[in-house]
Amino acid sequence: MAKSSQQHAAENRQTIVNAASELFREQGFRSTSVPEVMRAAGMTHGGFYGHFASKEALAAEAVDGAFDWLEGWVDTIARKNPDDADAAQAELVSTYLTAQHRDSAGIGCPAAALAGDVAREPAGSPVRERFSHGIETVIAQLSHAGRDEQTVLANYATMVGALLLSRATAGSPISDKLLAAARARLSATA
């Protein structure tokens, strides 16, 4: 049976959001053009405005999509360790603070990939609001595992900061040292 035009349009829209989410995390909002997003989605630039009112509207949805991935990843770790918050934290830390994650910004944590760009967005912008909501949701997920919110906030900030600094110094020995130091510190607090 053939797909309806609404179903096809919804699938195309999701393809665009997925491509934008990856490109924005790799290159930032300002360094990624609409034609580039559409090429990555396998579509022509002319079709963009049939799906989105603006690049900012796309960016807001792309932020949501990136946080959906992160929330799913955190949930998977929690389900693998349902009765052991320490084991869940250890797995989270050991998979988050890696050279592979550092080198894969486009498919990794949106907090580390987008924080600098989001900080430059105007207060009250949809992108900033969606980013804040994503952070709050992830913190709530991590807190649900039996940790107090202050510890979760500090641990997540340490992870994001270490990953961000490691990306900024990639290719230098300090890059791997930052990841190792954060892993060791967070493992000691488990």
Image: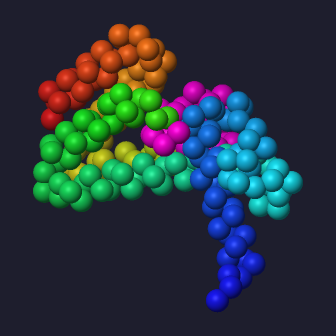
Pick whichever, 120 or 162, lies toward us: 162
**Quadrant position of the C terminus in the picture:** top left
- The image quadrant of residue 155 is top left
Pick whichever, 30 or 124, lies toward us: 30
Q: How is the image coloured?
A: rainbow
Residue at x-position 67% and y-position 47%: 40
Give the image location of residue 169, x and y in percent: 45, 14
- Considering every residue shown, the one lying at the far right of the view is 46
Give the image location of residue 178, x and y in percent: 33, 17
Please provide the residue range marked out in magenta: 106-131
Q: Is residue 45 left or right of residue 182?
A: right
- The image quadrant of residue 173 is top left
User: Above or below — where is 42 with respect to 166?
Assistant: below
**Quadrant position of the N terminus in the picture:** bottom right
Q: Main secondary structure of the magenta part?
A: helix
- Considering every residue shown, the one lying at the far bottom of the view is 1
Give the image location of residue 125, x and y in percent: 69, 42
